[in-house]
Amino acid sequence: MPKVRGIAMTAGLCSVLLMACGAADSIPRYTDIDHFGYVMANAFRASHPEYVVGSGDYAFERRPDEMAIDLHASPNGESSGAVAAFGIRQDRDSGGFSCTIGGDREPVPLEAAVRRLDTPESQALSAALRRVGQRGGSAKEDVDAALQQASRTKEVTAVVELTQPLTADEIRGRKHLPVNNGVFSPALGGTPVYWDSRVGLFCHVCGGDGDAVTRDFRHWVDSLLPSDEPALQHFGLGLARLNEAARAGRIHAYIQHAENPALLRKLLKQDYVKTMYIVRVAGHCADDEPDECSWPGDGQLYG
């Protein structure tokens, strides 16, 4: 009987190893560095709206056939000057994906690669974006009171959540402020799907025009292949969800950067705005004298 049990255990172990090897073999290996970069850099961009990727290029230290890129990220909407450089690589043998810091090839978790950029403001932005689509939310009266306390010498960054998802054109058909980014699918306990008007990385035809946020997002999603699924999953994304979000083209929320608090109060009163989450209050033209640097008193919404 012990011999039979040993045979059963060995068979079970072999099955586990075969499944593991099969899973590794099922991860497609990239051979086009531009497509690899286009997928990976923008998957990070879409899944981590608390950061912005200022530049990206082929990894400086890589073998000719190695899929490896270097990205430079900074906190979204801040002028601290902090930048984190990190690499994203695909292992040639296992097909798995990993992040590296500097010239070190030792893999580190993705969050560890960008943790150096975390500030109270970036953490507040991350938390606010992950509240989108949830029940409740900040009461408009409380948000209005907070905005009222900000003087004309202050600028406010806030996440604007909409009562119902709208296309960019539908937003611009109402009283509005400029919209150059959007959450196309809320996190709901997972990862948000976000896009902005920055020029696409590893993409020579992407716009970078605020009016083309949806078009550029769709352009990226349309370029994705079924074989990109494992890479997308590395960032908490999935092809089916991205296709659905791109097809709908509706914005659930967006980030209003460094805005006049008086105009945000006017925007808050619009019925299509569910609420706002204030993530940063800073001096407007902080390097100037307060008496010479303030928002105009008669600002109006567009539309």
Image (spheres, helix red, strand yellow):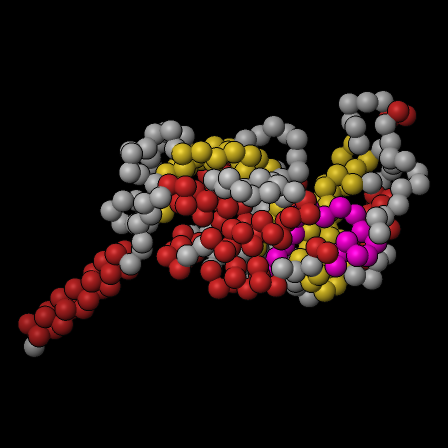
The image position of residue 186, as x and y in percent, is 61, 59
Q: Residue sitting at 29 percent across and 33 percent down?
A: 63
Q: Is residue 175 left or right of residue 10?
A: right
The residue segment tinted magenta is: 170-186
**Exactly how many numbered labels are in the figure?**
0
The image position of residue 126, as x and y in percent, is 61, 48
In this view of the protein, can residue 124 be seen by the observer?
A: no
In this view of the protein, can residue 106 be seen by the observer?
A: yes
Residue 107 lies in what quarter of the image? top left
Residue 181 among those drawn in magenta: yes
Q: Residue sitting at 40 percent across and 34 percent down?
A: 58
Q: Is residue 139 left or right of residue 111?
A: right
Q: Is residue 10 left or right of residue 87?
A: left
Residue 202 among those drawn in magenta: no
The image position of residue 168, as x and y in percent, is 70, 55
Image vertical order of residue 274 relative to residue 204, above or below = below
Q: Residue sitting at 71 percent across and 61 percent down?
A: 166
User: In terms of depth relative to the viewer, which is nearer, 199 or 135?
Assistant: 199
Q: Is residue 46 left or right of residue 266?
A: left
Image vertical order of residue 130 relative to residue 14, above or below = above
Q: Residue furthest right?
A: 298
User: In terms of depth relative to the viewer, which is nearer, 225 or 300?
Assistant: 225
User: In terms of depth relative to the viewer, which is nearer, 111 or 223?
Assistant: 223
The image position of residue 86, as x and y in percent, is 44, 35
